[in-house]
């Protein structure tokens, strides 16, 4: 059988392994950590609190279902999820509270009730976003931006008329501020820049398509939490014959002439016709391909933001909170200036709280909740993270306690922290940036590394640091794009 090696078992690597196995390859996945998942791991804290360590939002679930279908399985027999009736609970410093219902119509009605924005105005905005998404997604998200075939496909005929409305020449914030006058709604829409680690005051207006995923398609929750995505897909991969080897970091990608021929680890050499790197593209070149010319323009693109995450076991339940909750800062522009220009954390950061025990009660003891508390922060560039962890913790407790009218500090019974240095060490994400490079300029999408090597045949790239970007859906799409470029193996896997 033709052989393939996948470096890293993040969600992109797992998906690539499954797709290659279906194409007839004998696949080996090599993972430096003790288990699979990359950022999509889980852990428990004393007292019976379970946490998903990284990603917490799940959209476009059909991309997971597709992997089971490709393997001849019925997706619902192996992986189940439900659509959320409420996407997010929003809290503003002025005391405004808003429930973002999953239905675009209900969301627009709530915005009219709470913010005074005519519901028809928001509904028309979301309809426009849906139209532009459907006109452009197959060109910009489902195919390589670095292949001529993409621009010669029929999908481009749908994309071209939509280009003038995409906001390529303006920023997210400028576009949102033109569309709506209420600063709270503008802030709510601006926050979608953080879904790929960017700044709404710099990122192009094209990112305003992101809300379509939540309000026109839906946000979802997998049975058992986000970790269940990786867990179910690894099981599928194993059923297809994929071998997962843990605690075995790759030391070098082997080459001969202009072709990748396999990889080397401390345990030996794995020869392969196809090598797929799910490792961040920067350490892939710097550590695994030190003797090959690197695409410096790409590797030196500005990094995305990172995260400072507090995992708290809370000795109380909060019925006013849901799975996803946002506590906004007073001055959003100042917050992003601190992240991307000053490379630090503002005194009044926006706080995201994810509570999976709302949907999986066993994730916390009776009467308790498991709080995943996240603040967007800069990537690691040598900051004093110990000081920032303490300072930000105080800001978060002060802010959320005031919003809920409860002193939260005495309720914390268990705690763990993940900062950019830890994220970098645990996941090989360069500088702890969650999404590789940021999207803070109009050419950012085209400057992302392609899903294939232009120098070495047989070498491909998946994951959040390459096209089309970070987050669960885009990582799954990166695996599809990359493996579609891989020729079918001569042997066939029996599903």
Image (spheres, rainbow, N blue to C red):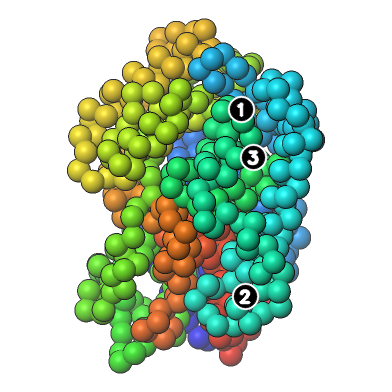
- Left-right relation of 211 to 267: right
Q: Residue at x 38, y 45 (%)?
A: 305
Q: Give the label on residue 22, or none.
A: 2
- Check disc 1: other Cα within 10 Å, few if <14, some if 14-19, many if 20+: few
Q: Nearer the viewer, residue 205 or 237?
A: 205
- Left-right relation of 222 to 169: right
- Left-right relation of 312 to 394: right
Q: Position of residue 81 (x, y in %)?
A: 70, 44
Q: Nearer the viewer, residue 106 or 384?
A: 106
Upstream in sequence: badge 2 or badge 3:
2
Upstream in sequence: badge 1 or badge 2:
2
Secondary element under disc 2, as helix, strand or loop, is helix
C-alpha span from label 1 to label 2: 50 Å
Q: Quadrant of the C terminus?
A: bottom right
Question: Looking at the image, is mark 1 or mark 2 nearer the viewer?
Answer: 1
Q: Residue at x 66, y 48 (%)?
A: 213
Question: Looking at the image, is mark 2 or mark 3 nearer the viewer?
Answer: 3
Task: Report which quarter residue 397 is drawn in.
Answer: top left
Whether residue 478 is visible, yes or no, is yes
Q: Residue at x 31, y 73 (%)?
A: 295
Q: Residue at x 26, y 79 (%)?
A: 293
C-alpha span from label 3 to label 1: 10 Å
414 to 253, vertically: above or below: above
Residue contact at pointers 3 and 1, CB within 8 angstroms: no
421 to 441, vertically: above or below: above
C-alpha span from label 2 to label 3: 46 Å
- Check disc 2: other Cα within 10 Å, few if <14, some if 14-19, many if 20+: many
- Left-right relation of 412 to 87: left
| Residue on which disc 3 sits | 179
Task: Report which quarter residue 150 is drawn in.
Answer: bottom right
| Residue on which disc 1 sits | 182
Q: Position of residue 288 (x, y in %)?
A: 28, 71
């Amino acid at each position: 059988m033709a052989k393939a090696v996948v470096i890293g078992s993040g969600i992109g690597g797992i998906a690539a392994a499954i797709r290659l196995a279906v194409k007839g390859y004998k696949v080996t996945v090599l993972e430096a950590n003790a288990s699979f998942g990359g950022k999509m791991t889980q852990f428990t804290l004393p007292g019976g609190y379970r946490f998903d360590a990284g990603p917490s939002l799940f959209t476009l679930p059909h991309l997971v279902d597709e992997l089971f279908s490709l393997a001849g399985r019925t997706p619902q027999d192996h992986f189940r999820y439900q659509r959320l009736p409420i996407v997010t609970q929003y809290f503003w410093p002025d005391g405004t509270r808003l429930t973002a219902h999953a239905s675009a119509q209900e969301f627009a009605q709530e915005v009219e009730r709470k913010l005074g924005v005519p519901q028809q105005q928001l509904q028309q905005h979301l309809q426009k976003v849906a139209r532009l998404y459907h006109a452009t997604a197959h060109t910009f998200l489902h195919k390589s931006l670095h292949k001529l075939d993409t621009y010669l496909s029929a999908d481009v005929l749908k994309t071209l008329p939509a280009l003038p409305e995409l906001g390529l020449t303006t920023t997210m914030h400028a576009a949102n501020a033109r569309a709506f006058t209420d600063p709270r709604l503008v802030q709510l829409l601006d926050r979608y820049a953080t879904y790929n680690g960017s700044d709404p005051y710099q990122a192009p207006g094209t990112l305003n398509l992101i809300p379509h995923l939540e309000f026109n398609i839906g946000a979802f929750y997998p049975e058992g939490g986000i970790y269940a995505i990786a867990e179910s897909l690894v099981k599928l991969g194993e059923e297809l014959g994929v071998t997962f080897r843990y605690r075995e970091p790759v030391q070098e990608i082997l080459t001969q002439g202009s072709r990748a021929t396999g990889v080397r680890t401390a345990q030996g050499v794995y020869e392969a016709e196809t090598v797929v790197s799910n490792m961040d593209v920067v350490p892939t070149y710097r550590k695994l391909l030190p003797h090959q010319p690197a695409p410096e323009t790409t590797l030196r693109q500005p990094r995305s933001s990172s995260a400072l995450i507090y995992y708290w076991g809370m000795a109380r339940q909060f019925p006013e909170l849901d799975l996803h909750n946002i506590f906004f800062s007073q001055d959003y522009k100042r917050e992003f200036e601190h992240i991307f220009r000053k490379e630090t954390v503002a005194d009044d950061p926006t706080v995201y709280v994810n509570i999976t025990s709302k949907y999986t009660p066993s994730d916390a003891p009776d009467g308790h909740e498991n709080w995943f508390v996240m603040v967007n922060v800069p990537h690691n560039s040598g900051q004093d993270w110990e000081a920032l962890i303490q300072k930000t913790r105080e800001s978060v407790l002060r802010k959320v306690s005031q919003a809920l009218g409860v002193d939260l500090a005495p309720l914390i019974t268990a705690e763990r922290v993940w900062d950019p240095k830890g994220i970098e060490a645990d996941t090989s994400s360069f500088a702890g940036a969650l999404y590789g490079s940021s999207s803070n300029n109009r050419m950012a999408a085209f400057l992302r590394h392609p899903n294939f090597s232009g120098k070495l045949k047989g070498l491909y790239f998946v994951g959040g640091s390459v096209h089309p970007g970070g987050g669960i859906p885009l990582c799954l799409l990166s695996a599809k794009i990359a493996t579609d470029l891989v020729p079918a193996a001569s042997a066939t896997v029996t599903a």
